[in-house]
Structure formats: structure tokens, C-alpha cells
């Protein structure tokens, strides 16, 4: 692993954006040694997945925890990771595995009770469609998008995140909760308007982005996790956290969701207010007084026992991927910070040895500390955004 880290450092210093932006930057693939490492590890995880016909989500009690076959907001990430590997290697084994695994949840495209159909189907079928132009994948995306926009409230001008008629959400007294994570579901809607020519999807996405911009963020560009609205008046009822330390703190993955979300909004609309918002969130993350020197944040920027708090590699991988795209649009130079994160994630501290970590790539992510779930474990979406960041960075 020491050698792997050294090789990655050489790679990072040789590819684009390291000191300035020009049109003559070098371009190259992911380093062969790192790609070989990823190939070996994920080949083992794919074998387990196909054997059990299940999608790996995380690790619990030393064993792989598989996605719930009835519904799991993370189920699209592992097939999406395999599509990225197919994109990078042209090896049909990744394509075949991605198709087999995503087919297991295709019927979830009809779910109107879940806002995360955007996550699920853009990362899986969306990546597959972009690579193969398979018309059946496109139709799955359209159905999922139609399901998603049923959750849009024209008074609030936002997509409802959670239903509040059952489960732990019903115990909170909410009426129309909207979480910052929901910004990530907008990419499916923007993409659908692009490929179908129907503006109804992007109109919903823009309205949601604007409402979130108005109500979710503080003056320093930190984000509340959840805003509860009155569905009849559109007024804000409360501003809270669900997975962060407290209402007034900054949940680290939530900051990364916002950064990624407004960067993709700028990609599709070229609206300068989205670029400004993404730049503001990036500045908040990069300059935070409690950010560790290696660039991998604690699970909350104000977690109570820093530095003795779990890190969240998923928040770091997500931020790195978003910053690589933002760097294309902004006058700021994010390359040194991007490379710091990717170097850290590719070190032996975070990147697992082949055969370890139950065959996931990254160690040390956090799902939800307040719920006591997925603390200091691998997560499939950490691996997804890590691979996405490496691919984006190499280009």
C-alpha cells in the first residue's frame, strides 16, 4: 500500500489542474496500479453479490450488510460503480454485473413514496444509458422521474423527502420534510429534460433548487439538514438536523450533498447563483477550522469530541468529486485540495488491502451516528464517489 500511495502521488502531480488551468493540460487514465487494486477488490465483491443475488451496502458485525430488496436508497450505487469501471476498462464483466444487479430493483421505478428514486436510477440506469444508449434503460429512467415529480408540492416548490405517516419520521411532528440530500435527486430530472426534450422535469428541479437555496443555508454557506414546511402555506415550520450533531451544527455529508447538488445545477442551467452557492459551500468546507489536515472531515464539523470523533470518508469522496467538476466552471483553483483528499483516501489509512474490509474499497465512513447506524464502516456510496472522483480527476 505504501507503493500504491507513492504511485498515486506521482499520478496526481502529473495530471491536469495541479497548478493552473490551461488548454494543454496532460490527460491520462487512472493509474494502472491503483486500477488493478480496485479491480481485484471489487471483483471479489461482485462475485459475492452475484452469488447471493444481492447488492452490498455496508458491513455490520463483521459481515456484509446487503441492501433491502424491498427498497434501499443506496441500491443504485454499487451498479453505478460497476458502470464506471466498465467506462474505464471496457471490460464486459463490469457491464454484465451492473445489468444483472440493477435489474433486481427495476420495479422500484414505480415508487412514489421515496424521493431517492433519483439517486437510485440516475447512478445505475442513468450511468448505463450514458454508456450504452440502451433504450430500455432510458424508459426506466423516465418512469422513475415521473414517480419522483409526484412528490413535488407547487405551493412549497419543493420535492418532499420523507413521508410522515409511518416509521420514525411519523414521530417527529413534521408535515413536509425536505433534506439537503434531496439536491442529489435533481440530476435525474435535469438529465431527463435533456434526453426527452420535456421541460417538466427540469422545471421541478429548478424550483426545488431555488427553495433549498432560500431556506437551507446560513450566511456562512453551512446547511441545515432538514427544513419542515407547511404544505398549505409553504411557510417554514422548523429547521433541524436528523443525522448531524445538533440543529445548529454542520453535518459533513450534508455539506457535500449541497456542494455536489449546486454544482450539477450550474452544469445544466448555467445560472450564476448556483455557481456562487457551490463556491461558497466549497470555501466553507475547505477552510473550516475543524477540518483535519488530511482533508477527511469528521462526521459533523462541530462533533462534540473532536479530535476523538469518527471521520466520514463518504463526505470526503463526495466533496472531491464535486470539486473536480466545480473546478471546470470556477475561477478558483481547487486542485490542491482535491489532490489532498484523493491522496488521503488512496492511502493505507482509508483504502483497504485486497481481500480485507469485506471487499469494499474505502474504510471509515459514517451513516448516521444519531441513529446508531453504520458508524466507522465501509459504505457503497463512499466507494461510488471515490471511483467517480478518480475518473473525473484523470480527465
Image (cartoon, rainbow, N blue to C red):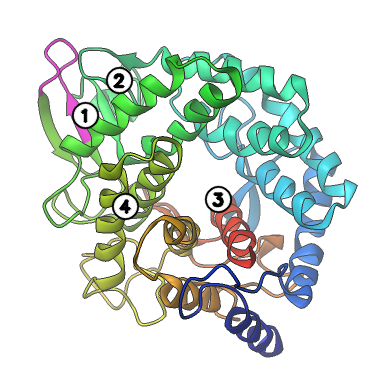
Q: Is residue 335 visible?
A: yes
- Which tag, 4 or 1, sits closer to the chain's start? 1
Q: Could you give the CA–CA distance between mark 1 and mark 3, rounded to whole angstroms? A: 27 Å
Mark 4 sits on what residue?
278
Nearer to us in this view, 221 or 65? 221
Q: Main secondary structure of the magenta part?
A: loop
The Cα atoms of the two marked residues, 1 and 2, are separated by 8 Å
What is the quadrant of the N terminus in the image? Answer: bottom right
Q: Give whichever of discs 1 and 2 has the lower sequence position.
A: 2
* Mark closest to the chain's N terminus, 2 or 4: 2
Q: Position of residue 387 (x, y in %)?
A: 63, 59
Marks 3 and 2: CB-CB under 8 Å?
no
Percent of width and height locating residue 30: 71, 69
Q: Secondary structure at mark 1?
A: loop
Whether the residues at callouts 1 and 3 have beta carbons within 8 Å, the answer is: no
Magenta stretch, residue numbers: 227-235
Q: Nearer the viewer, residue 101 or 374?
A: 101
Residue 113 can be seen in this image: no
Q: Residue 229 magenta-drawn? A: yes
Disc 4 to disc 1, how far (Cα)?
Answer: 30 Å
Return the mark for residue 381. Answer: 3
Question: Do the residues under discs 1 and 2 have CB atoms within 8 angstroms?
Answer: yes
Residue neighbourhood size for the residue with mark 1, other residues' Cα within 10 Å, grouped as few (<14), some (14–19), many (≥20): few
- Please identify the quarter of the rendering in which residue 77 is found: top right
Disc number placed over residue 164 in the picture, else none: 2
Name, please, the residue furthest toward the front.
23
Sequence-first tag of 1 and 3: 1
**Label 3 to label 2: alpha-carbon separation:** 25 Å
Q: Nearer the viewer, mark 3 or mark 2?
A: 3
In this view, the residue farthest toward the right is 92
**Residue pictured at 42% horizontal, 80% vertical:** 294
Does label 3 or label 4 sit earlier along the sequence? 4
Amino acid at each position: 500500500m505504501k507503493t500504491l500511495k507513492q504511485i498515486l502521488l506521482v499520478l496526481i502531480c502529473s495530471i491536469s489542474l495541479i497548478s493552473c488551468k490551461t488548454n494543454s493540460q496532460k490527460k491520462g487514465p487512472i493509474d494502472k496500479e491503483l486500477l488493478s487494486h480496485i479491480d481485484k477488490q471489487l471483483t471479489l465483491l461482485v462475485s459475492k453479490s452475484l452469488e447471493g443475488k444481492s447488492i452490498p451496502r455496508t458491513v455490520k458485525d463483521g459481515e456484509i450488510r446487503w441492501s433491502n430488496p424491498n427498497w434501499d436508497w443506496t441500491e443504485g450505487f454499487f451498479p453505478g460503480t460497476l458502470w464506471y469501471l466498465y467506462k474505464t476498462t471496457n471490460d464486459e464483466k463490469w457491464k454484465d454485473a451492473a445489468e444483472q444487479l440493477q435489474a433486481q430493483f427495476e420495479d422500484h421505478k414505480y415508487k412514489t413514496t421515496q424521493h431517492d428514486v433519483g439517486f437510485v436510477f440516475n447512478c445505475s440506469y442513468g450511468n448505463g444509458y450514458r454508456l450504452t444508449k440502451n433504450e430500455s434503460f432510458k424508459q426506466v429512467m423516465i418512469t422513475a422521474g415521473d414517480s419522483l415529480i409526484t412528490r413535488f408540492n407547487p405551493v412549497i416548490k419543493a420535492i418532499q423527502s420523507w413521508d410522515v405517516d409511518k416509521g420514525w419520521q411519523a414521530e417527529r411532528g413534521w408535515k413536509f420534510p425536505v433534506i439537503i440530500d434531496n439536491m442529489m435527486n435533481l440530476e435525474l430530472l435535469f438529465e431527463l429534460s435533456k434526453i426527452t426534450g420535456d421541460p417538466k422535469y427540469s422545471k421541478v428541479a429548478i424550483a426545488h433548487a431555488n427553495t433549498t437555496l432560500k431556506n437551507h443555508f446560513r450566511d456562512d454557506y453551512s446547511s441545515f439538514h432538514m427544513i419542515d414546511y407547511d404544505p398549505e402555506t409553504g411557510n417554514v415550520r422548523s429547521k433541524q438536523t436528523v443525522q448531524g450533531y445538533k440543529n445548529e451544527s454542520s453535518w459533513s455529508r450534508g455539506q457535500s450533498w449541497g456542494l455536489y447538488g449546486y454544482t450539477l445545477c450550474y452544469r445544466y442551467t448555467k445560472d450564476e447563483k448556483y455557481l456562487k452557492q457551490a463556491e461558497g459551500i466549497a470555501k466553507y468546507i475547505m477552510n473550516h477550522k475543524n477540518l483535519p489536515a488530511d482533508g477527511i472531515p469528521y462526521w459533523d464539523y462541530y462533533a462534540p469530541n473532536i479530535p476523538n470523533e469518527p471521520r466520514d470518508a463518504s463526505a470526503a469522496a463526495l466533496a472531491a468529486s464535486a470539486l473536480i467538476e466545480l473546478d471546470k466552471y470556477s475561477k478558483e483553483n481547487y486542485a490542491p485540495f482535491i489532490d489532498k483528499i484523493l491522496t488521503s483516501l488512496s492511502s493505507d489509512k482509508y483504502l483497504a488491502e485486497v481481500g480485507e474490509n469485506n471487499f469494499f474499497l474505502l474504510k471509515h465512513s459514517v451513516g448516521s451516528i444519531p441513529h446508531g447506524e453504520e458508524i466507522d464502516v465501509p459504505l457503497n456510496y463512499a466507494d461510488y464517489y471515490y471511483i467517480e472522483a478518480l475518473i473525473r480527476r484523470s480527465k
